[in-house]
Image (tube, rainbow, N blue to C red):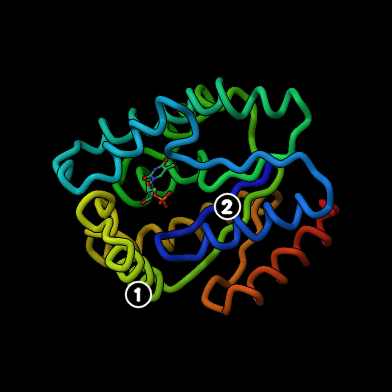
Amino acid sequence: MFITFEGMEGCGKSTQVNKLVEHFIRLGHDVLQTLEPGGSKLGQDLRRILLDPKNSDLASTSELFLYLADRAQHLATTIRPALENGRLIICDRFADSTIVYQGYGRGLDIKVLHQFNEVAVQGHWPDLTILLDVDPRVGLGRALNRNKRQQVADTQGRFEAEHLAFHTRVRDGYLSWAALNRKRFAVIDGSQDPDTVFSNILCVLEERGFV
Ligand code: TMP
């Protein structure tokens, strides 16, 4: 089973990923918790580059190829071996982030991005993708506060530094892409308190026969 989480900055993904991983471990599953960018050794270096605000001049196409390199390596060294060993994978962001951020957000051609994604994922699409939906103002506000609290704004804040218009395109892009991929996506309101969001996630898993 391969489950991914998606959503804009500050939507609450990390909290919910942690909760779901703990839940499945309690049920006795062998769980791999991973993320993009950064789910491989090479990916950890790519993540630093991709989130660093000093790289604000990164061309959209260079940014795209770095995310794709991260994904291809993640797939080859982390995800595929875990799937082959029958592990349950819970991944914070995956190929849909490229469609939404580089496509809807930066304006690159979505059909082309989908083809590149196919090359990177080699048929290993998630069984379920949970989209945590929040108003861009709420998400951005939460993300900026978190970066300040953790003192990482100067090293990891490249996307948070984008204008509200960019984040609004990302939010709307996610909703459009989820509507086009209804079978795989579940959209959950991420503005509620974390326990309510989590119980809604468990309901979706039950409804779709995952638990
Ligand atoms: P996060 O994992 O801390 O949310 O940060 C990752 C950032 O990278 C986030 O702003 C979304 C962005 N991103 C893309 O633009 N394209 C991608 O393909 C992926 C995986 C992430």
Q: Residues within 10 Å of mark 1 (few under 14, many from 20)?
A: few
- Please report the residue visible at 35 percent of the width from the left and 66 percent of the height from the top: 146
State the residue position of label 1: 137
Q: Nearer the viewer, residue 161 or 186?
A: 161
Mark 2: secondary structure: strand
- Please report the residue visible at 22 percent of the width from the left and 63 percent of the height from the top: 163
- Please report the residue visible at 53 percent of the width from the left and 53 percent of the height from the top: 6
State the residue position of label 2: 5
Instruction: Count numbered badges in the picture.
Output: 2
Q: Looking at the image, tell me whether mark 1 or mark 2 is earlier in sequence order.
A: 2
Q: Which mark is residue 175?
A: none
Question: Could you tell me residue 150's position as x and y percent?
Answer: 33, 62
Q: Is 154 rendered above or below residue 144?
A: above
Q: Is residue 152 left or right of residue 79?
A: left
- Please report the residue visible at 29 percent of the width from the left and 45 percent of the height from the top: 51
Q: Quadrant of residue 111?
A: top left
Q: Is 178 rendered above or below residue 70?
A: below
Question: Could you tell me residue 40's position as x and y percent?
Answer: 48, 29
Q: For the residues marked 1 and 2, what is the alpha-carbon distance in whole angstroms?
A: 20 Å
Q: Check disc 1 and give the amino acid type.
A: Arg
Q: Residues within 10 Å of mark 2 (few under 14, many from 20)?
A: many
Specify whether tag 2 is near ligand 1 (CB below 8 Å). Answer: no
Question: Could you tell me residue 88's position as x and y percent?
Answer: 73, 39
Q: Check disc 2 and give the amino acid type.
A: Phe
Q: Is residue 175 left or right of residue 152?
A: right
